[in-house]
Amino acid sequence: MAAVVAVGALSGCAPEDFPDDGKPIVVTTFTVLADIASVVAGDRIHVRSITKPGAEIHGYEPTPGDMRRSAKADLIVDNGLNLESWFSQFVEPLDVEHVVISDGVKPIDITSDAYAGKPNPHAWMSPLNVEIYVDNLVRAFTGIDPGGAVAFQANAVAYKKQLRQVHDDLVAALRTVPEKQRALVTCEGAFPYLTRDAGIAEHYIWPVNAEQQATPKQVSETIDYVRDNDVPAVFCESTVSDRPMKQVAAATGARFGGTLYVDSLSDADGPVPTYLDLIRHDAKTIVSGLTGR
């Protein structure tokens, strides 16, 4: 319970108090899931994220306020795949149903000796996987609000069409990049599902953001990869320092292609206030970086 009762570094990153209007309440572990859930829920369910925009999800430390508010929920949604290392301790004392939104996703293991056999948790970075997330939400929401079943399904059908279009647009745009240069080099290894489904290679400095500190060996290996494959651009994620990747860019002559969003949305007036905005932003940034356009 230490992680639950201690006030963490991100104190105050809790869902706001809920309206008292009788609608079901759903709490998610981070902002990306909250946005996906809110699209499926429509106006029938109140959806909140435990963490705020910009928060790093892997090592988040829940606050007493997080627990107090989440105890009022009808359902708590987590990503699973070992993303939220703090979640099991958080949810155990709460008498609230919870659902793992990634159930049914075919996991990709992290390619690192330190994490051998563990799945990469960033399944939402492929829009095709988010279609599975959406189906899981429809079932879960119907369980807490049976009268909304038709609405949830209709919202899901429309949303999945948008998800598939984003995927198709990304694949089509990447075909303009020379095949050898179709590689996504990032700070964190957060993109194996996207790169698999888009048909490009992936390389990264560190495997998960639980590390966040690049070792000289990791930087050197990334420099070698970029040089050997003539990768035209490299990228980093919004929740970590881009300094190591800019070191790679300086050593290789590759462009620093820009900032990618993974673990968190931005505020409403920022560049990625929704999940679809996040995926579209990342797709555009990747294609622009690799093509130089």
Image (tube, rainbow, N blue to C red):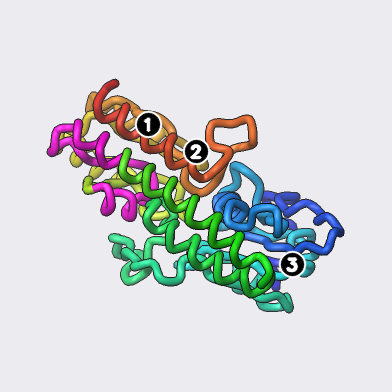
The residue singled out by tag 2 in the image is: 277
The residue singled out by tag 3 in the image is: 73
Which image quadrant for residue 259?
top left
Q: Is residue 177 magenta?
A: yes
Which image quadrant for residue 169?
top left
The residue singled out by tag 1 in the image is: 285
Nearest to N terminus: mark 3 or mark 2: 3
Residue 3 placement, left or right of 188:
right
The amino acid pointed to by label 3 is Ala
Crowding at mark 3 (Cα within 10 Å: few <14, some 14-19, many 20+): many
The amino acid pointed to by label 2 is Asp
Residue 225 placement, left or right of 70:
left
Q: Do the residues labelled 3 and 1 touch (CB within 8 Å)?
A: no
Q: What stretch is highlighted in magenta?
A: 170-198
Residue 199: percent from left, percent from top: 22, 48
Residue drawn at x 45%, y 71% as measured from the top left:
103
